[in-house]
Structure formats: structure tokens, C-alpha cells
Amino acid sequence: MMNRRQAIAAAQWLASRNGGAAQSPLLVVFSGPAQSNTIGLMDPTLVTGYPGIDTPNSSITFVQKNAPAAVAPPVFVTEGPSSLGPRVSPIGGSYAAGRAGVELSMLPELSTALGGRTVYGIKLAVDGSSAVNHWDTNGLTTDLMAELYALIDTWSATWGIDNLADNMLIVPNQGEADTGQTYAVNFAAWESILITKLRGRYGNVRILITATTSTSDTTGNVRAAQTAIAAKYTRVRWVGCNDLTLRDVAHYNDQGYAVLGSRLAVAGAELISDAARTTPYVKAIGPITVASSVQSITPTLPPHAADDILLFVVAALGNTSYTLSPDNGFTAVTGGDVHDGGNALNARLQLFWKRAASGAESAPTMTDLGGDDSKIGLVLNLGNCKATGDFWSAIASATEATDTSVSFPTLASTVVANALVLNIIATRADVSAAQGSAWVNADLAGVMELHDDHNTSSAGYGLIVVEGRKAVAGAVAATTGTLATTSDKAMITIAIAPP
């Protein structure tokens, strides 16, 4: 995963782009649950390798307001290791100057990345127990949009921040603890809040999409909902969080929140700096499509535009070989079919692709085969890829025996510089929880899990996608990691070429 050291290096690069010119203060607006997962007082002594989270910083001011009628806890509990016991501190008052988890992990690094720019943070804390969607007004008897407007208007005036379209960053802290489908439905409300209402009032404000609790996203709806908004609108980015270390089934630990804050800082600095993306990146991820043994698969395409690469990824039975009909312009990736045919219950991974001609492409259908088993698929949208010919510059595949260790295939060379390296794995783990963790590769920068969804259909299937970046052309050693459950594995490592 991208750690704080990598985030600081990225921040220094961005700071060099910004020069020393005087800049207006920046207002960062957080909103989300009033529970400890985002505003717990983090104890730096419990965060190994992440010192100084609560160190005073003259460039940072942070305040919080609990929404009226919200049932806020009287104390906020650290997200420290449970073995050390909770540490509590009263917060009190309508507004609270406070040290926060994600918030004050992010804000100092954001200021550094923007050349020391003054950054103010505010948060409207909504009762996290009222509904899985923290903007549901059920039981709150208040207009949360009016509360958020008042908070933004009051503090921007107090701090002398004008032109909020260019000097404000919105970070909605929606959690992922509900089911994937429920989250996706609720997240549609965010589109109205963020795009229609906030942008209608303040202009084309910048927005970062992430999640501040863990996920039970067994069908990919959470990630699809987040990436869809980022792909659909300008000045919006999504920040991956599926690989963060958990404290329990619903919350990241302190290190996880600190890393998420670092990622938000780098992505936020890129947005504020209007740093154009010039290398390949995962633009959006569609939801998982699950088919039974007698069904075909027609996946849902994520939002896309002309020249985007649509990559259809399928996990299926080891001794089957699927074709597309109709293919609607999708074709097999050369070298993108891997399996161990010696056992029918082993995993198979197949890749198909298409270069989009417009923003309204039609999905292919992977036909059913007699006597096969269940199968799953999803589509990745890749932006800033090579404009002609194959979109990849190198590819390798491998299978592994049934165990919990993972060692992806190596690449002799990416052939080109500034490649995006995707590690994709199909498993046969018969579980519903995410499985991957501890992904590392010294040859790649920004190693991060983008997608990890498993289900219990028939014998069970799962797909994991891990990305990394290779700035200089050359060999790529194996990306390694761990699965929570023993499984057979079919794996592909593919280097995506830049324009």
C-alpha cells in the first residue's frame, strides 16, 4: 500500500509544482458519521510509524459541529489496538477544536503538498446510528443541507476564504459497513448532494470520494458507486481503501486511518494543483456480475468516454474456456487466459478488452457452457492508455496451489516507462468477505488493492485487483500478499502502456 513516506515524497513533488506564490486559504469540508471511526482522538504512541499526528501545526485549523438532534456519543474513543483498551476524552460544546483521525492525518500533509498553504478543515458530524446512509434525516428532525451550508458560509467568512469553487475541497466520509447494494442506493443521494446542491450553490468545487469504514461489498457495488461518480464528473477523484488494515469487522485501525489520510492528501493536492494525469490509471470499476451454472454474463459497464480501455475480467471454472457472443467489439487479451486444467474445480482467469469509441458502448455477453459452474465478471475502465494497437506492453500469467500465500508472475520488462502494472487474481475461496492483504513489491510505487470481492455462489469465486506503478522501464519482481482463506489461484500481471 502507499504509506506515509510515499505520500510525503508525492507531496514534495507537488509542492515543487506550486512555487512560492501567495495563495488563498483552502477550506476542506468533511461530513459523515459522528462515531469514533473518523473523529476519535488518535494517540500517536499507538500509531507505530506514524508520529506527530496531533502535533500542533500553524497552517491547520480544524473544527467540528454535531448536527442538531444527532445522538452523538459523550466521549470519543481512540481507534487504538483493542488489546491496549480504549482511551477516551470528552469533547463537549457545539463546536470542538479537535485532533482527528482521517482529518488531521490528511490536512497537514495536504498543506505541505500545496507549498505550505493555509488549510482549514470543518466537519458536520451526523448521527451514525440513525441509518446506514448518514445523511438520512430519519430521527434527526433537521435539514442537513441547511446545516452544511451554514457551516461552510460561517467559517469561510470567519477565515476570509472567498471563491469557494476554487478554494474548497469536499471529502464526504461515507462508510462502507452496510451491504454493497444498500450503499450503492444510498450513495446515489450523494450525487444529488455533491453535484446538484453543493456545486449549484458554490460552483465547480473539487470532491474526493472514499470510505471511512470497512466494507461488506460482496458484489462490488460500493466501489462501482464511488468510481462511477469520479469517472462521470470533472474535478472528482476516488481514493482506494480496500487494502487498509482493520481493527475489527467495521473499522480500520489507527495505521489504516493514517494511510487513508495520506492518500487523501496526495489526491487532494493533485486536484487543487490541477495536475493532469499523463499516465495510465484505473478510471472506474463496474460492479460484479454473478452468474449461475446455467446463466451467461453480461456485465455492467462503468462510465467511460472515447479512447478509454474497457477491460472485462472473468473468474470461472478451471477446465472451461468461455467465448463472447455477441462480443460487441470486445476481443480476448493475448496471453490473458490462465488456468490449471488438471482439476475442474481450480480457478480460471480470462481477460477481454475494447477501446471505447464513445461514452455509450454496449457490453459483451459471455456465453454459458453446458456442465460448467458459476462464474463472475466485472469491467475496469482504464484511462490515459496507449492510443493505438494493444493497450499493454507486457503480460505474464501463472497458477498457484491451494494455500494462503500469493506470488504474482514477474515481468522481464515493462518495455516502456511510466507503466501501470495491474496484478489480477481469480480465486476459488467460498467466502463472502474480502480476502487480500499485505501487498508489497519493491519494484513498484503506490502498491494498492483496488478491488477485492468474493461470493459463495456454488463452489465460490473471487476477484482481486492490485495496482502499482513503474516509472522506469525494466523488470518487475513478483507482487506478494496473503489471502485470508486457502484457495487455488489463477493470476495475471499486465503492464499498461501510457500514451
Image (spheres, rainbow, N blue to C red):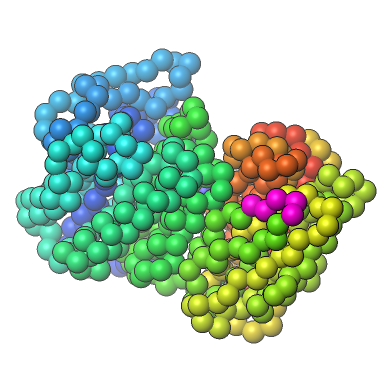
Q: Nearer the viewer, residue 483 or 84?
A: 483
Residue shown at 50% from the left, 77% from the top:
360
Residue 222 lies, in percent from the top left, at 47, 50
Answer with left or right where residue 450 lies relative to residue 404.
left
- The quadrant the C terminus occupies is bottom right
**Residue 44 appears left or right of 75:** right
Q: Nearer the viewer, residue 180 or 101?
A: 180
76 lies above or below 432: above
Q: Is residue 58 above or below residue 195?
A: above
Frontmost residue, 48 versus 79 = 79
Q: Which secondary structure type mostly characterizes the magenta part of the structure?
A: loop
Q: x%, y% of residue 198?
A: 21, 60
Snapshot quadrant of residue 498: bottom right
On the question of residue 396 being in view, the answer is no
Residue sitting at 70 percent across and 75 percent down?
326
Magenta residues, start to end: 290-294
Q: Quadrant of residue 354?
A: bottom right
**Which residue is rendered at x = 55% and y = 77% of the image?**
361
454 shown above or below 331: above
x then y, percent, for residue 58: 20, 44
The residue lying at 73 percent from left, 70 percent from top is 324
Question: Is residue 404 rendered to the left or right of residue 236?
Answer: right
Q: Furthest residue to the right?
A: 342
Looking at the picture, how far across and down is residue 418, in whole percent? 59, 69
In magenta stretch: residue 188: no
Disc tally is 0
Residue 46 visible in the displayed image: yes
